[in-house]
Image (cartoon, helix red, strand yellow):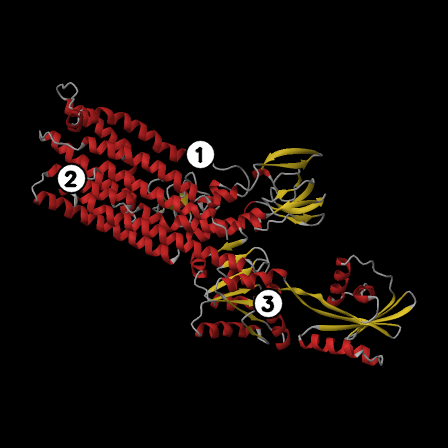
Amino acid sequence: MKTDDVTPQKYTCPMHPEIVSGRPGRCPECGMNLLEMPKSKGKDHKPVRGEDQGHDWHMAHGSTSGGSMDKHAGHRTESFLRKFWVVAALTVPILAYSEIIETVFGWAPPTFVGQEYMILALASVVFFYGGGVFLTGAYREIRARLPGMMTLIALAISAAYVFSVFSVFSGRSETLFWELSTLIAVMLIGHWIEMKAVVGAEGALKELAKLLPDTAEVMRHGAVQKIPLAELVAGDTVLIRPGSKVPADGTIMDGQSDLNESIITGESKPVAKKIGDAVIAGAINGDGALTVRVDKIGEHTFLAGVMRMVADAQASKSRLQMLSDRAALYLTGIAVGSGVITFGAWMFAGAGIVTAVERLVAVLVIACPHALGLAVPLVASISTTKAARNGFLVRERIALEAARAVDIVLFDKTGTLTRGEFGVDKIVPVTHGGEDEALLYAASANSHSEHPLAGAMIREAHKRKLTLLEARNFQRLPGKGVRVEIGGAEVFVGSTVLAEERNMVLPPALKAETDALARQGKTINIILKDGVVLGALALADVIREESHDAIAVLRTMGVKTAMITGDSEDVARWVAGELGIDEYFAKVLPDQKAEKIKLLQSRGQKVAMVGDGVNDAPALALADLGIAIGAGTNVAIESAGIILVRNDPRDIASIIKLSRLTYTKMIQNLFWATGYNLAALPIAAGALAYRGIILEPAVAAVFMSLSTVIVAFNAMLLRRQSI
């Protein structure tokens, strides 16, 4: 098999080199920016754990093709805890022989010849073993020309260590070994706590992967076998017991049950499933046993598509994240510059090199931009997961950010606000038999017809639990209606033209009402039995029940609504009036939809477009926010920034609300992270030393880690807020 000379570009974490991704983004363990890896020759390339044949790392750690989560997950985190305990043990003797113990407690351990070299040896182990992860991380950052947190920490501990080694060999008694060891110990335990917080906040894809079971019960060789999900293949027949999860996308071959698909579609109501219906991997079975033929596995399943979309959204950046990334890079430069100025100022003041180096270390540590770099990505990770759990998928984070500023939502009528199929809107009876008699004869007469209007009548009759009458000698009258014989009576159902041809004069009240309904763009059918008018049916594209709530909620949020349709003015006016839509555009040709977007934007409005067809793709792409109905075409979906899994317009309000909540959380985190650094940096430099307030390097490390934990905790509060 021929291979390329150079492997595709890979990205890795400066602190966790075993994390490998096929795209830029954030480390799932610590949230740091992934850095470009040097490219290697294809024939020499050996995959690293976490790499998955060019797929994103998420697929390696939670594959939708089956299998459990990465069993090594957490080992990387625990390694920091192990290092901490080793460093903490070595710090005890280093601290015991430091001058601070004697100063504070008035006690000193026994001295011996060469004790300074023993302390040097212990501190060297602490520096290279405990601090090695920061040194190698700094090397990767500098090599990638993206200095950041690791660079600052490496500079801080290196400055303390090099100065102390120089002091030992030059015969000076002043060293920073105890400050160095406590600093590294605190940073190790602090980073362990940070990683716990970050993993808790950024587990979007791991959460989605947990929706799949670890095993499946498959029928092979006449018996039911339990196999790992990874061994499942398309065409297998699986048994899904009550209460268990669906292992793969497939079709029900036997049985019926209610399935809970809320974890995937956001639809809380269980969905009734029977033979021939499709099931989605990750759905939870109700109280019925099902036999399912596996149609799609692994990356071809609906859930895998959701995971890829979430991964794409997390890899993309919003404007706020771009701003915070830039600020974090600038902060690194400010930290180095401030450290140099601080060192020079204390030396100029005659405080001595020990104090100067100590202040330099504190400044470098306190200014680490880790919290600032995580402020936006953690919130974005939670919001994209929250969106997926509520039935809409974010393709680009910048789209979710744009939703908060939307002034007007432009709905495509057919298939979005309406069901895109005819339904019985109103029955106008004439005889004493009432609505049910008129509908019964209309549906029975059309029981052999394939016309969409016939289907609407039959569905309405079934909905009302009417038993259809036997119709004989069915005759289709093109463009007019149908003629049948029911119980020996001649029955006609069709347009007003058909009634006129039969010389039927409609009662004045019926004619007045049907004319009014016709002006609303509804299709009128008259029912005749043996020359007697039973009544009339008004049929129209059925407005979704959810549309009323969607428009009402948007209005309460201060968002205007508009509708676009190719239907007549009468139809558009009626639908807009029924729903309370602020503005509508009728008789719009497919290639004119984008022009209406431009018209609204020319008024200074931020426009969200909601559509589901190929004709909507240009408008979706042009709008400030494109929202595609998930049941629509791939062309429309590819043109949108957000995709609705369900055909539920109420989700539009949820998108805007989530966007506003997300933006608020991002601003809170940015304020905390930047405010913290701006306030703490002067204190670390010694601005309050004249009042006796000195920030030791180890205390600075505590504050640095604490800021990251607070940012992560604040981001996780978003999970509890309802949309």
Residue 219: image quadrant is: top right
State which tag comes first along the sequence, 1 or 3. Answer: 1
State which tag comes first along the sequence, 2 or 1. Answer: 1
Q: Nearer the viewer, residue 179 or 507?
A: 507
Q: Which residue is mark 2?
A: 692
Mark 3 residue type = Leu
**Residue placed at 60% from the left, 41% from the top?**
247
**Seen in the image, is 534 located left or right of residue 554?**
right
Q: Which residue is mark 3?
A: 579
Density class for disc 2 (Cα within 10 Å; few <14, some 14-19, many ≥20) is few
Q: Position of residue 609 (x, y in %)?
A: 51, 66
Judged from the image, the secondary structure of the residue bearing numbered disc 2 is loop
Q: CA distance from mark 2 to mark 3?
A: 68 Å
Mark 2 residue type = Gly
Of labels 1 and 3, the one closer to you: 3
User: With respect to residue 701, does 485 lie above or below?
Assistant: below
Mark 1 residue type = His
**Residue placed at 24% from the left, 29% from the top?**
125
Judged from the image, the secondary structure of the residue bearing numbered disc 1 is loop
Q: Position of residue 352 (x, y in %)?
A: 9, 38
Q: Which residue is mark 1?
A: 72
Q: Position of residue 378 (x, y in %)?
A: 40, 48
Q: CA distance from mark 1 to mark 3?
A: 54 Å
Q: CA distance from mark 2 to mark 1?
A: 47 Å
Q: How many marks?
A: 3
